[in-house]
Image: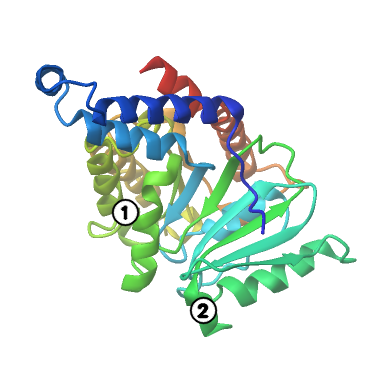
């Protein structure tokens, strides 16, 4: 059965060049003397080459959305797609990795832990949005079905013109959930080209010390091990959500609680991710974002959408450009 993603011809050519180089470096034609010289100038050169091959052979260019359980990831994705296909919940519910991509047909592919792939074609459904929502509830919602924990990923395709080529949006299980859910998120990290972190400001000011910072630390470690060679640190986006939960009592003698929380949160983000661009930290209530009503959250979301589309454009050819450049 065919999967959604396909590598470009340029990616295939680079992978082929890497494979030819690997064959030569392991052959008898490559003398011990040359091996020693190369090892001195490029330690662990074969390991580095293998990681580059693994990276260029990745099919998808993933923009990963992560955050604590109930931070608002599902709401954010619905707003981005302008469709209500994911149902937000206060408790841990999303059980697996969900990949969302542009496709002429509306369909869902599920991959089990054993590698089995099954397809559901929804193209001919009268209400495609409802059909997607109902199917995804069964496939990803642990409160509706226990079977969903056995899926490695759920691949969703429908018409999303702003997503180019193999660029996909990836919804991940909530941080701070069960060990299995967190493990699935951690396993997917090396596949990301960019991240959007959704932060619930009502949860201890937004930055739980044992949750989101741990993910940020893991990304840095993966980079140090050269397992994310195409990841752009300064493209990371932080969405701070649920500001309406901050109780503000005005007092002329000191800053209000919302202002103090905002300053502290900005400081915490910059401390844990020093390369963050200040314009990539957004402050809004996702539930207030609306096409009909202009408000601060809607304006901030439009600004976020512009940054997101710029990152999507960068992701189109980033692997080819980065591998040819390095």
Of helix, strand and loop, which one carries label 2?
A: loop
Circle 1 residues within 10 Å: few <14, some 14–19, many ≥20: many
> Who is closer to the viewer here, 166 or 210?
166
Q: Name the element at disc 1.
A: helix
Q: Nearer the viewer, residue 296 or 96?
A: 96
Mark earlier in primary sequence (2, 1)? 2
Q: Vertical placement of 20 versus 203: above or below?
A: above
Q: Quadrant of residue 228?
A: top left
Q: Give the residue at mark 1.
A: 212
135 relative to 81, above or below: below
Q: Quadrant of the N terminus?
A: bottom right
Position of 88 relative to 188 (above/below): below
Instruction: Kindly check if marks 2 and 1 are in contact, taking CB atoms under 8 A apart as contact.
Output: no
Between 59 and 282, the one nearer to me in the picture: 59
**Quarter of the figure that contains the C terminus:** top left
Q: Position of residue 79 (x, y in %)?
A: 65, 51
Q: Quadrant of residue 204?
A: bottom left
């Amino acid at each position: 059965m065919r999967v959604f993603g396909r590598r470009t011809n340029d990616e295939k050519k680079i992978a082929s060049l890497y494979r030819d180089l690997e064959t030569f470096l392991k052959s008898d034609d490559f003398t011990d003397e040359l091996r020693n010289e190369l090892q001195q100038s490029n330690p662990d050169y074969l390991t580095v080459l293998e990681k580059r091959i693994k990276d260029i052979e990745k099919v998808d260019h993933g923009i990963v959305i992560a955050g604590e359980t109930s931070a608002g990831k599902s709401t954010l994705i619905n707003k981005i797609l302008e469709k209500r296909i994911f149902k937000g919940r206060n408790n841990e519910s999303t059980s697996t990795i969900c990949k969302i991509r542009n496709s002429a047909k509306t369909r869902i592919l599920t991959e089990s832990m054993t590698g089995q792939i099954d397809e559901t074609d929804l193209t001919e459904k009268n209400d495609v949005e409802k059909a997607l929502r109902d199917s995804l509830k069964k496939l990803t919602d642990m409160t509706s079905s226990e079977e969903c924990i056995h899926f490695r990923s759920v691949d969703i395709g429908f018409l999303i013109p702003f997503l180019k080529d193999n660029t996909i949006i990836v919804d991940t299980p909530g941080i701070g959930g069960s060990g299995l859910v967190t493990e699935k998120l951690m396993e997917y990290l090396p596949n990301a080209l960019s991240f959007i972190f959704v932060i619930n400001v009502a949860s201890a000011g937004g930055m739980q010390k044992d949750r989101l910072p741990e993910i940020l630390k893991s990304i840095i470690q993966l980079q140090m091990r050269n397992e994310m060679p195409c990841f752009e640190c300064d493209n990371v986006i932080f969405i701070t959500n649920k500001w309406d939960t901050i109780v503000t009592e005005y007092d002329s003698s000191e800053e209000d609680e919302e202002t103090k929380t905002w300053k502290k949160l900005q400081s915490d983000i910059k401390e844990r991710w020093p390369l963050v661009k200040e314009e990539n930290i957004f402050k809004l209530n996702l539930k207030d974002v609306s096409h009909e009503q202009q408000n601060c959250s809607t304006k901030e979301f439009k600004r976020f959408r512009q940054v997101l589309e710029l990152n999507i454009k960068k992701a189109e050819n980033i692997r080819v450009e980065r591998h040819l450049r390095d």
